[in-house]
Amino acid sequence: MTEALKITKTPDEAIRALLAFLLESGKASAVLSLDRIGQDGAPIYSLITEAKGLESAAPLLPMMPSNAGKLLAEMTELAPSPEPIAAVLKPCELRALVELKKLNQANLENLLLISTTCGGVFPLAIRNNGGISEKLAPYREALAKGEVADGIRPTCRACEHFVPYNADLTVALVGGQANDGTCTVLINSSRGAEALEGFEGERTQAKLESDAIEALRAKRAEEATKLFTASDTAAPGLDGLINIFGRCLACRGCSNVCPICYCELCYFDSVVEDPTPSKYEAQLRHRKATRVPPGTIAFHLGRMTHMVISCVGCGMCADVCPVGIPVATLFSMVGKSADKVFAYVPGKNLDEDLPLKKYEVDELSHLGEERIES
Amino acid sequence: MSADAFAPNIIGFFCNWCSYTAADLAGVSRKKYPPTVRVIRVMCSSRVDPHMVVTAFVGGADAVLVAGCHPGDCHYVTGNYRTRRRFALLQSMFESLGLGTERIKLAWIGASEGSIVADVIGGLTETVNRIGPNPTRQAMFL
């Protein structure tokens, strides 16, 4: 059981009211929340400093126009935020932020991190064709029952980390309690408790783990097995990789939106990787023809070696891919098995170093030791 | 290129302090091993970023060998422990992607182990001869 606040409003209204309260009481100077702009209400993240500005905010909308962990890291990369910011993030965005913190790319001081149990997000494409309003009711219904909602990102269907780690406040969105017109906010830290002080609601003890969460966890695990053993992406081999990545345009959208790919200049876009005439010449000495621009597989596999250990499976990369490459499926599959080697969960534990930043003397002793008898 | 004329092409990253010295010793002691390895000397096996192995592999190397000091003997004290973790990542990645792990190899070769250089290169050459050329040699749309 955890300290919690029960608010007699729907989660959406309750969190908007909470954000307004934080701004008005000065506990937060700004709020980072999903917002809706334009005639069709396209979701974007925005930084809001006045309660009035929260009218169009939709903090709990199941959309991810960009990974908010990356946004917060970019804001706080050089120095902690001078003013307190309250941010509403999805669990995987929070995990990305924690990974970026471990990579010295973010400062968590002065951030109030509000997260939710997450039912997944819809692909960005649906904001372009018809909006998501009609999808919200069935989505919430599925969450209340602990089912995998229809139409969400493939990696969301397979995500087993939908209960946030390291959140100051957790809004319960999975399970019946989220659909009965009330909102339960769990208090996980003293910073969270301070933020809620003076906010209207009933103090209680609550537990996040419910039947719905257990049911959803089991179903997500099932979906993960299904997704990661799908014939086109499981152990594709070289031919499979050429098939998957062959249509890549080299737009670099995947690495630009990837929260873990934080380098200002990607190695693979640097001048050493430029396809000069002499490189083509060297290639064409061995091959009858070569792809232009070359280096598709080298880029994707190279990027994979750099970031896959921290991949949080947010699905941004696949979502922005203009040619529909299942980048996220492949990367989260590889990441999951690599993380298993090091018993690591990206973004779970702030105090645990990145696997490639540390070592144990007594481990992996089978590597490098096989001897060939001559 | 006909199959019987296949000459394996292995890229070897050898650490300066142990493995490269051992390769030198193998030469001085006139140990025989197949001329299949192009050696790239690095100051420490932990200099080998996994993407360098990927680059060699995608570029058409039939096998990639990373050789360093025995764990505990690193000239820089902890470099090869880090190499070991990186190699574990690479192996796991190659396995998940269905590329097989036979074409990437990690070997600990001490400075005095000239004969082990010959063994490792001989063994890896045998493996490559058995499984054949790396398909990345001929693939056009990489």
Image (cartoon, coloured by chain):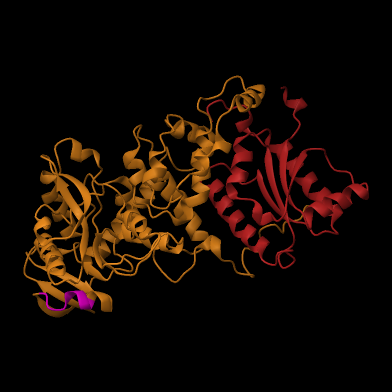
Chain colours: A orange, B red
Q: Nearer the viewer, residue A298 or A174?
A: A298
Residue at image location 27% in from the left, 58% down from the top? A90
Residue A219 lies in the magenta stretch: no
Residue at image location 11% in from the left, 51% down from the top? A137
Q: Quadrant of residue A358?
A: bottom right
Please state if A265 lies on the left or on the right of A136 as rendered. Answer: right
Q: Quadrant of residue A177?
A: bottom left
Name above or below for residue A261 compared with residue A321: below
Q: Position of residue A56 (x, y in %)?
A: 11, 52
Q: Which residues are magenta?
A: A193-199
Residue A197 lies in the magenta stretch: yes
Q: Is residue A117 visible?
A: no
Q: Residue furthest top?
A: A288
Q: Nearer the viewer, residue A13 or A373?
A: A13
Name above or below for residue A48 compared with residue A196: above
Name above or below for residue A123 compared with residue A207: above
Please state if B130 lies on the left or on the right of A125 as rendered. Answer: right
The N terminus of chain A appears in which quarter of the rendering? bottom left
Q: Is residue A80 visible?
A: yes
Please state if A47 lies on the left or on the right of A39 as rendered. Answer: right
Name above or below for residue A202 compared with residue A286: below
Residue at image location 31% in from the left, 65% down from the top? A81
Please state if A103 lies on the left or on the right of B121 as rendered. Answer: left
Q: Position of residue A224 (x, y in %)?
A: 36, 51
Residue at image location 66% in from the left, 58% down from the top? A367
Q: Position of residue A67 (x, y in %)?
A: 31, 52
Q: Position of residue A66 (x, y in %)?
A: 29, 48
